[in-house]
Image (cartoon, rainbow, N blue to C red):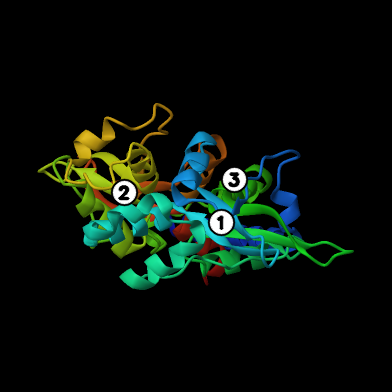
Amino acid sequence: MGGTGNELEKVLMEQKLAVESIRSFLKSKTSYDVLPVSYRLIVLDTSLLVKKSLNVLLQNNIVSAPLWDAKTSRFAGLLTSSDFINVIQYYFSNPDKFELVDKLQLDGLKDIERAIGVEPIDTASIHPSRPLYEACIRMMGATSRRIPLIDQDEETHREIVVSVLTQYRILKFVALNCRETNFLRRPLRELNIITQGNVASCQMTTPVIDVIQLLSQGNVASIPIVDEENVLVNVYEAVDVLGLIKGGIYNDLSLTVGEALMRRSDDFEGVFTCTVNDKLSTIMNNIRKSRVHRYFVVDGDGKLEGVLTLSDILKYILLSAN
């Protein structure tokens, strides 16, 4: 970071105070404050067939939905693209059981996840009147990186699913309401928040099943696609898997990433990149204007250097010592 000693000290101090101010803002608000005036919430019954739940997600252009157990009248966890990836891996490894996929219900996912040794469906939640900061901390510990808001009916005391908070929604709320984000002017390279080095990647010729395994093993929502020179060319996302299996291609996953991307929907939001010299003020301004889920960090030649996720940004705001 260039400039005189006094200028550097000013930037450091402004960033420290800005983070503290944003943190105080999150502690002063509740999850209710983040919710839009009107919104649509889709809750799926655990007796629903997995293949039907997939169609519901795709038709409504969503990637997750709360689950409801009608037998107990309780929230039963959050369905995400990771659960469908687990189903794919199970049937790919057990082709003799493939005919059962059409009969699989959502409450049977726990058996699939136990069989392949992965985390069960995320059941973390929080009451919407709790401080937003607390919801953020709870979200950081959730494997889905989302947190359902669960209230209780005053008369029946039954649980009510209010909404699902995402990292993007929280960071956009901060970007829209905290002018202090303009003072986050330290370069990213100084903040130690970029994942560098062991960033899993693939190429256009990589079989989709290999990328699905990378998504699962790394518990990540996307894998960058690079060319032979490690130049970033695209990204394969967990949500792309949903569109693929909608066509019934559970058992034909040897097709390449390039072929799979031909089936991607037209509303793909694109690949967002940044460099180690960019500042969080710029990143937050982009989040305010665009639906960003992650940044891939590239050098001057467009070569992949790392990844900056919304989790990394939120964790910095919540927990950094500055």
Q: Amino acid at mark 3?
A: Lys
Q: Specify the label residue 47 is tagged with.
A: 1
Residue occupied by mark 2: 297
Q: Amino acid at mark 1?
A: Ser
Q: Residue at x 32, y 60 (%)?
A: 216
Q: Residue at x 82, y 67 (%)?
A: 157
Give the structural element (helix, strand or loop) at label 2: strand
Query: How far apart in space, not on screen, are marks 3 and 1 (Cα)?
Result: 35 Å
Residue 213 placement (x, y as % from top left): 25, 58
Q: Residue at x 34, y 32 (%)?
A: 264
Left or right of 157 in this view: 51: left
Binning the other alpha carbons within 10 Å of mark 1 as few (below 14), some (14 to 19) or many (20 upward) gives: some
Q: Earlier in the sequence, mark 3 or mark 1?
A: 1
Q: Residue furthest left?
A: 228
Give the structural element (helix, strand or loop) at label 1: loop
Q: Amino acid at mark 2?
A: Val
Binning the other alpha carbons within 10 Å of mark 2 as few (below 14), some (14 to 19) or many (20 upward) gives: many
Left or right of 27 in this view: 223: left
In the image, 302 versus 146, the foreground residue is 146
Q: Earlier in the sequence, mark 2 or mark 3?
A: 3
Query: How far apart in space, not on screen, are marks 2 and 3 (Cα)?
Result: 21 Å
Residue 187 visible, this orientation: no
Residue 246 visible, this orientation: yes
Query: How far apart in space, not on screen, are marks 1 and 2 (Cα)?
Result: 42 Å
Residue occupied by mark 3: 172
Tell me if residue 72 comes above or below residue 80 in the rendering.
Answer: below
For marks 1 and 2, give the one nearer the viewer: 1
